[in-house]
Amino acid sequence: MTIVTKDNGNRRLPFDKNRLRDFITNTLNVTDEAYANKVIRTIESKDECTADFITEQLINVASENIDEANPQWTYVAAKAYLFRLYKQASKNRAYDAKDKYGGLYGLLKTLGTKGIYAPNILEKYSRDELRKASEMIEPKRDLLFDFPGIYALATRYLATDYEKNVYELPQERFMIIALHLMQDEAKEKRMGYVAEAYWALSNLYMTVATPTLANAGKSHGQLSSCFIDTVDDSLLEIYNSNTDVARLSKSGGGIGVYMGKVRARGSSIRGYKGNSSGVVPWIKQLNNTAVSVDQLGTRKGAIAVYLDVWHADIMPFLDLRLNNGDDRQRAHDIFTGVCLPDLFMEQVEKRGDWYLFDPHEVRQVMGYSLEDFYDEEKGEGSFREKYEECVQSNDLTKTKVPAIEIMKRIMKSQLEAGVPFMFYRDEVNRMNSNKHAGMIYCSNLCSEISQNQSPTVQISETLDEQNGEIITRKKAGDFVVCNLSSVNLGRAVPADVLERLIRIQVRMLDNVIDLNTIDVKQAQYTNRKYRAIGLGTFGWHHLLALRGVQWESEEAVQYADRLYEKIAYLTIKASADLAKERGAYPLFENSEWSTGEYFSRRGYVGEEWSDLASQVISTGIRNGYLLAVAPNATTSVIAGSTATTDPIFQPFFYEEKKDYKMPVVAPDMNHETYNIYRRSAYVIDQRWSVKQNAARQKHLDQANSFNIYVPNTIKASVLLSLHMQIWQSGIKTTYYVRSTANDVEECEWCQS
């Protein structure tokens, strides 16, 4: 007879298989005898086991049953996993596990006393308000999670004590996020906003950014996803930037760093020629920071470094992530991005020459910085004029390289390491709604953010001998902050809730700006100056599958255009309505929002758009930047949908986890949706992905985190033509080039 031990071995009971069968039938809602028999056989093969071992078997056997034909088993595994969470939380919080959820107020008190939660919610909300919040919680919405979703949420985001004991449950995480984000709303309205935010989150109609999901309501960590710094060309500012990057990295932020202003190898230092070691050693310093400053042990820091394609150090920069060559010239833990003007792409197209310059020498000799200019129209503008002046100058050192050779180096690195990311700087700056206030030099770690940037510069450092204080004064630059949240297209669009959803989503994002505790002050300053948000989406392939629309079709392209125009309209309207209530962002005057040029530039016509443009011009808009589609790799898993605007990796595959070999099946898989999913990421014609992203890019004031999927055997000419199509289509950025280790069957397009 098998003995089941409980309470750390203090209780010993004979295994009751009839009780387990009853649990399987009535709690897991499974009538499959084979499932119950297999679980029971495994348990009865042991002389002794724990109660937790039984739960593990319920999960494991359900997981083994998951495949394309039987996707429903993922919800059985999720229920069994939830049951364990309920038991653990009830034990740690001293309530009956049959209730599933305990009182919210008690949870706030317990984890507040332990220092896990910040005191804000208990201080700002009354006991009666928290009782109402507790009553709003809907435990049955836990059943929306599939197994990968609940596993990801529970193991990475639910609040535990310092010994990792379970306290917080899924619906409580959503409610605490809602309470945290609405804490400073007017008292007579805020519980209504809390209810709306909880509705949006708990129905999985949207997700908040990973740092918000992890840190809202807690005593440590900030709420924003990523940041972008611009490094000035001085030893002091290079090290100051590295310190700022470290401070943000420890709090869960991903960092983009623009190094294009830093002098090249062989440049002069204080007039002495040939002394500069260039950007590579400084990038290696950032690489060490990424590795050394992890995020409370959960993951190492993540840093992307961008450089202009005319920078004299561009060739060694493009080799930083290669696996061969001199390892002293490699930085394996950072990500690279290259900033490309139209003129370079034109030279690649015509197989022309390209010139490389040292930015420090350009400033000294020409009296301007080449990176501060862009082409105002396709084919004409100030960048190409300044570039040509530099080419013609006899006083500048320059290196002539065939443009196609640089492009080959880019593509070689992309096929081997997935990077560099591509940043089409002219298009980005042409479409910048705040060009009156600055310049955009690069993107962020995930390539979806495009906002004004400038370096922070130290003005003075003085010693107050009387008080023994060193006083430092700095001029704050535009240090970009990404405040992100995403619509789950696979759930929100079929439920027809976009208007209601986006209204509360924009309010939540706007509140993040004021609630956030950012360690780097210039980032906090920039955040409040532009009040930038990035409302995005995920679940595009999921939505196409539900609608029966093939990826490789004009129908998908047209649908992307219509849907993202609607999302853009609703987002702008929500921000404009918020401006009536709270005022416009500080730099609204003279922006393209204030002049109406934002609307005319995109060709928005019709009565609705005309009325909205008039409203924005007259009363302002709350947020200077609004729309950006982030990767959503983790949060889309939690929400049970497909990532960002990408096609799925495969209809069914296994992902190795620490505790499980996790089966992953495409959402809402059935005989109809399989027909859409079966042509997955490495099979579909990427040219259709470009067309779709070009259609949605028109409606995004920022950018789209756009992965390119290719076999590693792709012809160089085909990959080049793909890059040329992307540039010509007006897409602002691309993210990874994800190449397979082996050739892909069915890939007709990539051999053409």
Image (cartoon, grey):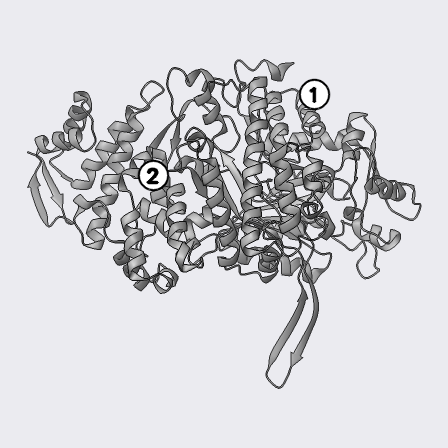
The answer to which of 270 and 551 lies nearer the viewer is 551
For discs 2 and 1, the disc positioned in front in the rendered view? 2
Q: Residue at x 49, y 53 (%)?
A: 512
Residue 266, x across and y down, in percent: 79, 50
Name the image quarter holding residue 189. Answer: bottom left
The answer to which of 395 and 464 lies nearer the viewer is 464
- Vertical placement of residue 506 versus 668, above or below: below
How crowded pointer 1 is (Cα within 10 Å; few <14, some 14-19, many 20+) is rated as few
Looking at the image, the residue that sits furthest to the right is: 394
- State the SS at label 1: helix
Name the image quarter holding residue 422. Answer: top right
Residue 42, x across and y down, in percent: 17, 29
Q: Which residue is mark 1?
A: 717
**Could you tell me which quadrant the C terminus lies in?**
top right
Looking at the image, the residue that sits furthest to the bottom is: 466
Q: What residue type is disc 1 on?
A: Ser
Residue 749 appears left or right of 102? right
The answer to whether one can see residue 22 in this image is: yes
**Could you tell me which quadrant the N terminus lies in?**
top left
The answer to whether one can see residue 711 in this image is: no
Marks 2 and 1 sit apart, C-alpha to C-alpha, by: 42 Å
Q: Residue at x 37, y 60 (%)?
A: 121
Name the mark on residue 128.
none
Name the image quarter holding residue 421. Answer: top right
Residue 308, x across and y down, in percent: 73, 42
Does label 2 or label 1 sit earlier along the sequence? 2
- State the SS at label 2: helix
How crowded pointer 2 is (Cα within 10 Å; few <14, some 14-19, many 20+) is rated as many
Q: What residue type is disc 2 on?
A: Tyr
Q: Which residue is mark 2?
A: 151
Residue 441 appears left or right of 635? right
